[in-house]
C-alpha cells in the first residue's frame, strides 16, 4: 500500500516538475523574443501612435454603407487651388459599392465551401491510412502522414501564391489553396476520430472475412460520421475567415476589397467589409451549432 502511494506521489511530483520545466522553457522563449526585438529596435509604436489611433478609430466608427442614406448627393471635389474637379453622388456610389460587396461575399462563400469539401474528400483516404488502429502498411502510413504534415504546415496564403501562378487569377486558385491546406487538418481530425473507436466492432466485421473497404463502410464510417460532420463544420467556418484574405493575392472575394480599402486608406469602407465578415462568420457559427446539436 505504501509503495502504491509512493508511486502515485512520484508520478504527481514528476508531472508537476515536468509542467514547471515546460513553463520555464516557454518563459525563456518569450524573454528571448522580447529581448531580441528590443535589441534590434523593432519594439516601437511609430510616431504619434495615440493621434493615429484616435483618427483611425474615428473613421472606422462611420462605416461607408451609411452613405446610402446620409451621403451627400452633390459632393464636390476640389484641387488645391480651388478648381472644381468633379461632383459625386455619394448615395449612388455607395449603392454600387455595396452591390460589388455582395458579389465579393458570394465569391468568398463559394471559395470556402468548395475548398472545404475538396479538402475533406482528399483527406479521407489519407486519414484511413494514418489511423493506427486500422493497421495500414508502413510505407502507405508514412507516405500519407508525410502528405498531411506537409499540407498542414504550409499556410493557405502560400498555397494561394503558388496556385495563382499555375492556374491564374480567380476563385479556382483560392478553392485549391483552401483545399490543400485544409486537407492536412481534416486528415488529422479524421484519423483521431477513427483511432477513438471501439475496436470490438471492427474486429467483429473482420472476423467474418470482410475486406478493408467493407470494414470501413460497415464498422468505421457509421460510427465516425457525426464526428466527421462536426469537424467539417468547424473547418468550413474557419475557411470562411481564411478565404477573406485570399483576394489580396488575386484569388477574388472580399480580400480584394480589403486590399483596395487599405491601400487607399478608406477606413470607412474597410469597416463595412469587416462588418460583413463578422456577420457572415457569426451567422455560419449559429447555423453550425444547430447542426451539431441535431447530430447529438
Image (tube, helix red, strand yellow):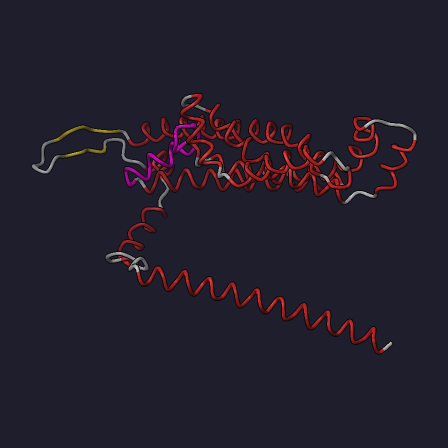
Number of numbered tags placed on the structure image: 0
In the rendered image, the residue lying farthest to the bottom is: 2
Residue at 83% from the left image edge and 26% from the top image edge: 211
Depth check, front residue: 107 or 121: 121
Of helix, strand and loop, which mostly describes the magenta segment?
helix
Q: Quadrant of residue 265?
A: top left
Is 83 placed left or right of 72 in the picture? left
Residue 23 locus on image (x, y percent): 55, 66
Q: Nearer the viewer, residue 174 or 11?
A: 11
Residue found 43% across the figure and 28% down from its top = 251
Q: Indicate the position of residue 38 as horizontal and vertical percent values.
A: 33, 63
The spot of residue 29 in percent (x, y) is 47, 62
Residue at 20% in and 29% down: 87
Name above or below for residue 231 compared with residue 251. Answer: below
Image quarter (top left, top right, bottom left or bottom right) of the C terminus: top right
Q: Taking 248 as reference, is 46 above or below it?
A: below
Residue extending farthest left: 81
Q: Is residue 91 magenta?
A: no
Check the picture and name the quadrant holding the N terminus.
bottom right
Q: Residue furthest right?
A: 208
Residue 78: image quadrant is top left
Left or right for 276, reference 296: left
Q: Nearer the viewer, residue 251 or 167?
A: 167
Question: What span is colored magenta in the figure?
Answer: 247-265
Determine whether, in the image, residue 70 is placed left or right of residue 2: left
Residue 249 part of the magenta-drawn span? yes
Q: In the rendered view, does 293 fall on the left or right side of 69?
A: right
Residue furthest front as drawn: 139
How far across and down, in percent of the image, does residue 156 sit? Answer: 49, 36
Q: Which residue is at the front of the view, 271 or 149?
A: 149
Amino acid at each position: 500500500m505504501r509503495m502504491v502511494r509512493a508511486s502515485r506521489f512520484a508520478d504527481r511530483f514528476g508531472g508537476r516538475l515536468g509542467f514547471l520545466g515546460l513553463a520555464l522553457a516557454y518563459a525563456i522563449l518569450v524573454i528571448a523574443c522580447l529581448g531580441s526585438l528590443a535589441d534590434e529596435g523593432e519594439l516601437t509604436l511609430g510616431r504619434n501612435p495615440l493621434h493615429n489611433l484616435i483618427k483611425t478609430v474615428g473613421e472606422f466608427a462611420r462605416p461607408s454603407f451609411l452613405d446610402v442614406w446620409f451621403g451627400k448627393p452633390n459632393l464636390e471635389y476640389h484641387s488645391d487651388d480651388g478648381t472644381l474637379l468633379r461632383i459625386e453622388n455619394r448615395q449612388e456610389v455607395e449603392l454600387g459599392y455595396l452591390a460589388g460587396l455582395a458579389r465579393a461575399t458570394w465569391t468568398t462563400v463559394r471559395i470556402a465551401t468548395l475548398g472545404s469539401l475538396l479538402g475533406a474528400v482528399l483527406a479521407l483516404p489519407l486519414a484511413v491510412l494514418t489511423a493506427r488502429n486500422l493497421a495500414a502498411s508502413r510505407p502507405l502510413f508514412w507516405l500519407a502522414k508525410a502528405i498531411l504534415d506537409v499540407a498542414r504546415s504550409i499556410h493557405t496564403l502560400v498555397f494561394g501564391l503558388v496556385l495563382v501562378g499555375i492556374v491564374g487569377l480567380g476563385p479556382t486558385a483560392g478553392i485549391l489553396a483552401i483545399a490543400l491546406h485544409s486537407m492536412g487538418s481534416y486528415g488529422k481530425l479524421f484519423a483521431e476520430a477513427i483511432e477513438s473507436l471501439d475496436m470490438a466492432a471492427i474486429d467483429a466485421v473482420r472476423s467474418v472475412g470482410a475486406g478493408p473497404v467493407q470494414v470501413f463502410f460497415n464498422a468505421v464510417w457509421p460510427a465516425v460520421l457525426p464526428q466527421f460532420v462536426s469537424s467539417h463544420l468547424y473547418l468550413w467556418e474557419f475557411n470562411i475567415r481564411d478565404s477573406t484574405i485570399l483576394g489580396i493575392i488575386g484569388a477574388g472575394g472580399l480580400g480584394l476589397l480589403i486590399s483596395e480599402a487599405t491601400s487607399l486608406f478608406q477606413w470607412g469602407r474597410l469597416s463595412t467589409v469587416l462588418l460583413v465578415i463578422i456577420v457572415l462568420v457569426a451567422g455560419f457559427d449559429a447555423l453550425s451549432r444547430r447542426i451539431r446539436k441535431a447530430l447529438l
